[in-house]
């Protein structure tokens, strides 16, 4: 089986050709410009390669409602040239293959569920803390969409007592993304995250916010595994800080052994590393083919 | 089809005989005592009535993991005599019929999805604000369990600037249940909720907390409909206050018409009123029979 995968991000497009085992035989990264500039390059990559389907994990918000006239479109994104761009439809027309289409984070959680840290589990979430905070949600072996799709990076948090920063989200003064994504860290402390590595108070505050969000995700999703990735998590010491604070916030209420006694295997790094998204995109193509 | 339904609550047990259309032909309410006192009464109600299955929506936490040796048990509940009581197993042994078993709030959201305010929809949540705060979660036409089951009433909230009350939850200083369920309202203001009807500040604070929780549920679940019930919601004016504040909290970020322009039909009262739970329990029995 020959499948195309596209991890469509606001900064870069990761294009791949692979198979249903997750083997990637060809990969190319294309910087994200405008649809006019970028789409021809993408199409050129996949054309003539004999793919049977294309899976796309796309930055959002996107329209995933199959009954909608704008199914497969990118919607009100901060990347203005892409607003209302028909991503799935354009690819379908150009490549003439079935298109599996979902959010980038749903793609990533799918990749981890099929080949990674959540392999064999029925319920998992994938959290990325990077230029934004996104959460891919996999419940009962299916990706969650709902009315639109989860936007769980915007859960509302209590402020750290010492945090006077106004928040970075233009919509919410105290949501997780606005307080804890990369741009918030950079703006609050006046330096890039990598340059702040030794500043203890930076990571203590960061863990405080990420842990609150994760406690909420445990309460609402009851996941079997939490996969935590993204650029901010390259500060590896954050993992243990987040595990410890999350456990303190739950305070024994969710009395499952997985949480109480095995936090290290409950909140984990992506096993596929940076390939969770592109491998998940491949599998979106595989699933689409299975449903045709 | 003759089906038994049991809405097992910490205060009362609602027992019913009905059919797959949700018609209830017989109903009895039994106060919840100890298992030793209460179970014989429950069994006596259902025995000899020719039911083909029994559906139970049960107060929790409960074990819903079919691979677990304690599947169907009530776990670490505040109702001490019921800790580790094998509710599903006892009923199965005594009545010799298939037992459908889930949480009380999952029962309620199922009832509303089959016959009530979420009829025909694929995704809905049922929130009860009463002696506790519970959330039944129905995604892609299925009830959500996960590792345990959602405990979304415990999401962590930001405190109201004027709230000095310590919170009622023994586990979390600022979770929704601890700040906004009935006992918290009563303890904070020193009077029962019904006696506080005219105190504007009471309901302003209550709406502040409920709205925060609902905004979080919208971000994480992306429901098509939110059904809001429970004793506290008998203060009907709360509905419009909650709709208004929830919309303000979302601040246009979730740009779906259902939310932006039709809040009255998005956050709604239970259409089945007090019968959502017992009718949902009946349907848990119907589903179980279908899966046998």
Image: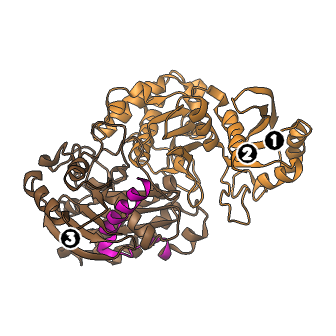
Chain colours: A brown, B orange
Element on which disc 3 rests = helix
Residue A56's disc is none
Residue B197 location in percent, x, y?
54, 23
Q: CA distance from mark 1 to mark 2?
A: 8 Å
Decide which of A179, A286 is in the foreground and name it: A286
Circle 1 Cα neighbour tier, 10 Å, few/some/many (<14 / 14–19 / ≥20) = some
Q: Which residues are magenta?
A: A265-292
Chain for mark 3? A
Q: Identify the image quadrant of the N terminus of chain A.
A: bottom left
Mark positioned earlier in the residue sequence (1 or 2): 1
Chain for mark 1? B
Task: Look at mark 1 in the image and give the residue it sits on.
Answer: B52
Q: CA distance from mark 3 to mark 2?
A: 56 Å
Q: Which residue corresponds to the image point at 30% horizontal and 49% vertical from the top-left?
A: A174
Confirm whether residue B2 shows in the render.
Answer: yes
Task: Look at mark 2 in the image and give the residue it sits on.
Answer: B289
Instruction: Tell which tag, 3 or 2, sits nearer the viewer.
Output: 2
Residue A42 located left or right of residue B85: left
Chain for mark 2? B
Element on which disc 1 rests = loop
Q: Which residue corresponds to the image point at 78% horizontal and 43% vertical from the top-left?
A: B53
Q: Are marks 1 and 3 on the same chain?
A: no
Q: Is residue A270 magenta?
A: yes
- Please say if the residues under marks 1 and 2 sit with CB atoms less than 8 Å apart: yes
Task: Look at mark 3 in the image and give the residue it sits on.
Answer: A193
Q: Is residue B67 magenta?
A: no
Decide which of B82, A22 is in the foreground and name it: A22
Above or below B227: residue B79 = below
Above or below B189: residue A255 = below
Residue B257 location in percent, x, y?
32, 31
């Amino acid at each position: 089986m020959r499948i195309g995968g596209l991890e469509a991000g606001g900064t870069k497009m990761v294009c791949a050709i692979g198979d249903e085992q997750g083997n990637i035989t060809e990969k190319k990264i294309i910087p994200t410009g405008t649809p006019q500039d970028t789409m021809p390059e993408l199409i050129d990559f996949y054309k003539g390669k004999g793919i049977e389907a294309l899976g796309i994990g796309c930055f959002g918000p996107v329209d995933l409602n199959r009954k909608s006239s704008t199914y497969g479109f990118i919607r009100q994104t901060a990347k203005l040239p892409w607003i209302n761009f028909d991503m799935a439809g354009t690819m379908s027309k150009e490549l003439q293959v079935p298109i599996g289409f979902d959010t980038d984070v749903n793609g990533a959680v799918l990749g981890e569920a099929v080949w990674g840290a959540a392999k064999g589990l029925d319920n998992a979430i994938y959290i990325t803390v990077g230029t934004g905070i996104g959460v891919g949600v996999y419940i009962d072996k299916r990706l969650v969409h709902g009315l639109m799709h989860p936007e769980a990076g915007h859960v509302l948090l209590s402020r750290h007592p010492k945090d006077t920063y106004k928040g970075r989200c233009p919509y919410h003064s105290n949501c997780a993304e606005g307080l804890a994504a990369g741009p918030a860290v950079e703006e609050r402390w006046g330096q890039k995250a990598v340059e702040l590595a030794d500043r203890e108070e930076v990571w203590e505050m960061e863990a405080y916010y990420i842990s609150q969000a994760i406690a909420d995700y445990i309460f609402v999703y009851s996941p079997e595994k939490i996969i935590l990735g993204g650029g901010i998590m390259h500060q590896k010491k954050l993992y243990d800080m987040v595990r410890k604070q999350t456990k303190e916030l739950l305070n024994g209420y969710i009395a499952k052994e997985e949480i109480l006694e095995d936090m290290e295997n409950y909140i984990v790094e992506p096993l596929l590393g940076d390939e969770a998204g592109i491998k998940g995109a491949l599998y979106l193509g595989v699933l689409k083919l299975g449903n045709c």
